[in-house]
Image (cartoon, rainbow, N blue to C red):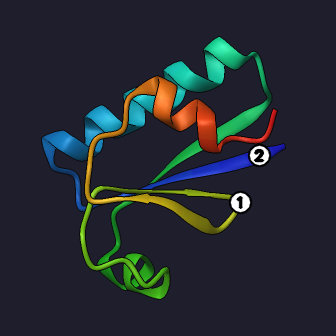
Amino acid sequence: MTTIQVLGTGCKKCVSLKENAEAAVKELGIEAEVQKVEDINEIVKFGVMSTPALAVDGQVKLVGKVATPEEIKAVLPH
C-alpha cells in the first residue's frame, strides 16, 4: 500500500492539499493511506522548508503549493 503524507502545520492550504490527495487516490482507484504530518520536527526531517508539501512513500514529490488532483496523480505509483 502506498503512503501519502501531507506535510504542513494545519493551514487552509494544507487541508486543501490533503483533500486533493484523497481525491487523486479515489480517481486512480489505488490503495493508499493519506496521512497528515503537522509536527514541525517531523516535517524538517523531510528537508522541507516550504509547506504544504506532499511525500509519497517517504519521498518528497511536491513542495510549496496546493497541487491539483491531476498533479498529484502524476507523482503516484499506478
Which quadrant is home to the N terminus?
top right
Mark 1 in CB contact with mark 2 (< 8 angstroms): yes
Question: Which residue is denoted by mark 2 in the rendering?
Answer: 2
The extreme left residue here reads: 12
Disc 1 residue type (three-letter): Asp
What is the count of numbered marks?
A: 2
Q: Secondary structure at mark 2?
A: strand
Which quadrant is home to the C terminus?
top right
54 or 41: nearer the viewer: 54
23 or 76: nearer the viewer: 76
Where in the figure is residue 68, as x and y percent of width and height? 38, 29
In the rendered view, tell whether residue 56 sits above or below residue 43: above
Q: Earlier in the sequence, mark 1 or mark 2?
A: 2
Query: Which label is found at residue 19?
Result: none
Q: How many neighbours does mark 2 have within 10 angstroms: few (below 14), some (14-19), or many (20 or more)?
A: some
Q: How many neighbours does mark 1 have within 10 angstroms: few (below 14), some (14-19), or many (20 or more)?
A: some
Q: Secondary structure at mark 1?
A: loop
Residue sitting at x 26%, y 62%: 51
In the rendered view, tell whether residue 51 sits above or below residue 23: below
Residue sitting at x 43%, y 85%: 47
Residue sitting at x 33%, y 63%: 38
Question: Which residue is denoted by mark 1 in the rendering?
Answer: 57
In the rendered view, tell whether residue 7 sits above or below residue 13: below
Disc 2 residue type (three-letter): Thr
Q: CA distance from mark 1 to mark 2?
A: 6 Å
Residue sitting at x 61%, y 36%: 74
28 or 22: nearer the viewer: 28
Where in the figure is residue 45, as x and y percent of width and height? 48, 86
In the rendered view, tell whether residue 36 sits above or below residue 71: below
